[in-house]
Image (tube, rainbow, N blue to C red):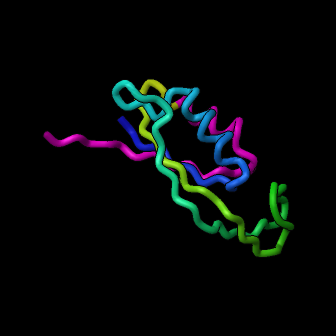
């Protein structure tokens, strides 16, 4: 199992979360679409050649974003990453993937 995380503008969080769940992330026992979300502020400066969804080249930008995390099986990872990239409005979404270890 893995934990997959992504930050997304709050305006698109439900869309990305649903895409992740439809692709197979967030399955725990008899539950699907299980996620955890933290709201925060994302900051970035689009550099020359960027095509930002929000903001302008060379200008520091602040955006209300949600940090979404969901569990994901190894078999579903590729499909989930593809779903995130399809639903996410940014040209360079930040996606992190961490292996999970379970102790008994």
Residue at left 37%, top 31%?
Answer: 28
Could you say where residue 48 lies in the image, as x and y percent from the top left?
83, 65
Extent of the magenta region? 78-104
Residue at left 75%, top 47%?
Answer: 89
Residue at left 46%, top 29%?
Answer: 32
Of 35 and 102, nearer the camera is 35
Residue at left 70%, top 68%?
Answer: 44
What quarter of the picture does the C terminus occupy? top left
Q: Is residue 79 magenta?
A: yes
Residue 47 occupies quadrant = bottom right
Residue 83 occupies quadrant = top right
Could you say where residue 53 lies in the image, as x and y percent from the top left?
81, 55
What quarter of the picture does the N terminus occupy? top left
Q: Where 41 falls versus 89 (above or below)?
A: below
Whether residue 79 sits left or right of residue 98 in the image: it is right
Whether residue 25 sits left or right of residue 16 in the image: it is left
Q: Where 94 falls versus 44 (above or below)?
A: above
Of 36 and 79, nearer the camera is 36
* Residue found farthest to the front: 30
Q: Is residue 25 magenta?
A: no
């Amino acid at each position: 199992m893995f934990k997959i995380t992504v930050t997304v503008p709050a305006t698109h969080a439900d869309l990305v979360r649903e895409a992740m769940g439809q692709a197979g992330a967030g399955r725990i026992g008899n539950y699907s679409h299980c996620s955890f979300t933290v709201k925060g502020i994302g900051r970035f400066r689009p550099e020359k050649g960027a095509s930002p969804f929000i903001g302008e080249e060379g200008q520091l930008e602040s955006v209300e974003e949600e940090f979404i995390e969901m569990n994901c099986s190894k078999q579903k990872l590729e499909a989930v990453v593809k779903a995130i990239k399809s639903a996410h409005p940014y040209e360079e979404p930040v996606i992190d993937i961490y292996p999970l270890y379970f102790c008994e």
